[in-house]
Image (spheres, rainbow, N blue to C red):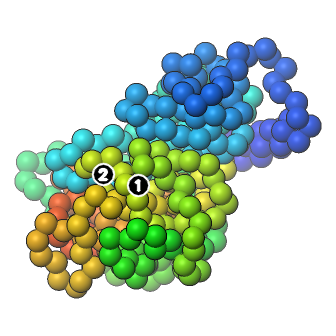
Amino acid sequence: MTAGAVALGIALVAVLTSTGGTSAEAAPSCRGDRISVADLATGCAVSSGTVVLSDGRRFAVPAPGTTVSAMPVAAAGAADHGDVSITNTGRTGLAVRVDDVWKGAAAAVRQERNAVRGRLAVTPQAATTTTAAKPSSCTNKTYSRLGFRWSAPVTWSYNPAGQKVSGASSIRAGADAWTGAIASCGKKVTTTAGERLAGNTTQAIGVTSAGGCGKSSGASVVGWGSLPSGTLAVTCVWSRSGAAVEIDQRYTTGQQWNTATTCSGARFDLRGVATHEWGHAFGLGHTAQNSGLVMKPASTTCETGQRTLGLGDVVGIDAVY
Ligand SMILES: [Zn+2]
């Protein structure tokens, strides 16, 4: 799809929304707080309510023209439920993507899959390795892109309510691993990715305890709360036609965390996990677990090496910014 076609689609949705009109086609409508993916496959028009995935994650239906994405990081050995994106196309219904599997309304899936392909100038690198030898993070140059990016620095606030550790500076260091001048694995790049911590807030986080995403608040908030067992953190991103507009992050209160320079015991390294989550926030997806990269799906305790970008991480952020 061309950029012009995307812009036209948005304008059309805006007109339909602002006049309170609905689709001319008499598509069945889905309502309520338990809309299943099977319901969405009917092509129903959805303007509110909650989509429930088979794994139990729940997502408030995003506004027309908006995509909400949830990117978890798992404790090594725990179930990985995968990255989820739900796009409300407006007229053609909702498209649901779990990793690389698309479901939902067929017309919406076609529309959104083509839009994502169009936004990604290059095909995402295959997140697989073919050699038996264990790859090191400085030789593996794979990455994947989620299909959105920020056009300005991310302004976010920290909600310390319930925090397991005083974590703002570790989480911010994780964000800054991706911004400005980066030197890692002998490679130097300068990215336009940026972030600004506006301060503390009492605003709620748009990540739910089931690991899904609630309603967009318009404000990017990072903080703490319960998450499914085995999930360390989840990032939700709201975007419109590939332009990110809000990110929220929740770190689990169900584990012990390290914020010291050196880490010991059964603790997860907050800065390392935050580096991974901010990779998602800036638009990067997962690589293979054995890639050794920051963007592999699962973390072990005290994995301080995850604070430092690997080769694929550097190449990936440079490709997006
Ligand atoms: Zn992840």
Alpha-carbon span between mark 2 and mark 1: 8 Å
Q: Quadrant of residue 221?
A: bottom right
| Residue 17 in picture, x, y percent from top left | 84, 38
Residue at 88% x, 30% y: name it.
21
For the residue pair 287 and 117, the one nearer the viewer reads as: 287
Instruction: Locate residue 174, reporting x and y percent.
Output: 38, 74
Which disc is residue 141 wearing? none
Q: Residue at label 2?
A: 231
| Residue 314 relative to residue 180: left or right | left
Check whether the beta carbons of the residues at disc 2 and disc 1 lie within 8 A of each other.
yes
Q: Is residue 178 left or right of residue 63?
A: left
> Which amino acid, by three-letter code, is at mark 2?
Thr
**Circle 1 Cα neighbour tier, 10 Å, few/some/many (<14 / 14–19 / ≥20):** many
Residue furthest to the left = 133
Residue at image mark 1: 234
Q: Is residue 187 visible?
A: no
The quadrant of the picture occupied by the N terminus is top right
97 vs 62, nearest the viewer: 62
